Amino acid sequence: MPSSKDSKSENKSDIMVRKFIDDIKKKDSAPNVYVGKVTKFLGNKRFEAMIDSDGIKNVQVAIPGKFSGRGRKGAMVSPGSFVLLGEDSSIKMFEMLALIKREFVELINKLSPIHETIYKLSEDDKEKDDVFEREVAKDLEEEDIDNI
């Protein structure tokens, strides 16, 4: 039985993101695939994301079934998360293709710069994470078990 840490959707996301990065390296980008940042949830397996497509746009995105139920464990999407989005040009609908990890976001930004408005929000989130980690570490240092 597979361990609970490894989920199929997480592995599929990583594979999809690696293929996207390989395409960027080969200068063979897909015209209907975007890197987006989740701004808010709308309910009914939908969320709003900010993308750079002829300027900054907020678009509604559908979450496919592979990211719900058991697949949701490894691919928890929250506001501030980066996602890979695909657009169906015939119906003008966006769908989540993969959840992008932070290290992949930084690599994608080096290879094909993400619009500064979208990426700047990521830096703010990173600073908040760093401040939180320092506060937790400080609290742990203050609670010395040997002195109790």
Image (cartoon, rainbow, N blue to C red):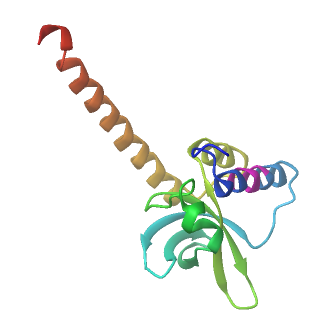
* Residue 89 drawn at (x, y percent): 74, 85
Q: Depth check: 102 or 113 in front?
A: 102
Q: Residue at x 34, y 43 (%)?
A: 128
Q: Residue at x 26, y 31 (%)?
A: 135
* Residue 27 drawn at (x, y percent): 86, 55
Magenta part mainly helix, strand or loop? helix
Left or right: where does residue 59 sit relative to residue 121?
right
Residue range in magenta is 13-18
Q: Residue at x 49, y 74 (%)?
A: 47
Left or right: where does residue 83 sit relative to residue 97?
left
Q: Quadrant of residue 106?
A: top right
Left or right: where does residue 117 sit relative to residue 3?
left
Q: In this rendering, does residue 133 appear at all?
A: yes
Residue placed furthest toward the bottom: 91
Work out whether 61 lies above or below 97.
below
Residue placed furthest toward the front: 1
* Residue 93 drawn at (x, y percent): 65, 84
On the rendered image, what quadrant is the C terminus found in?
top left
Q: Residue at x 51, y 77 (%)?
A: 45
Q: In this rendering, does residue 53 appear at all?
A: no
* Residue 44 drawn at (x, y percent): 48, 82
Query: Would you say residue 14 sits in the magenta stretch?
Result: yes
Query: Would you say residue 26 sits in the magenta stretch?
Result: no
Q: Depth check: 124 or 9 in front?
A: 9
Work out whether 55 lies above or below 93.
above
Q: Quadrant of residue 132?
A: top left
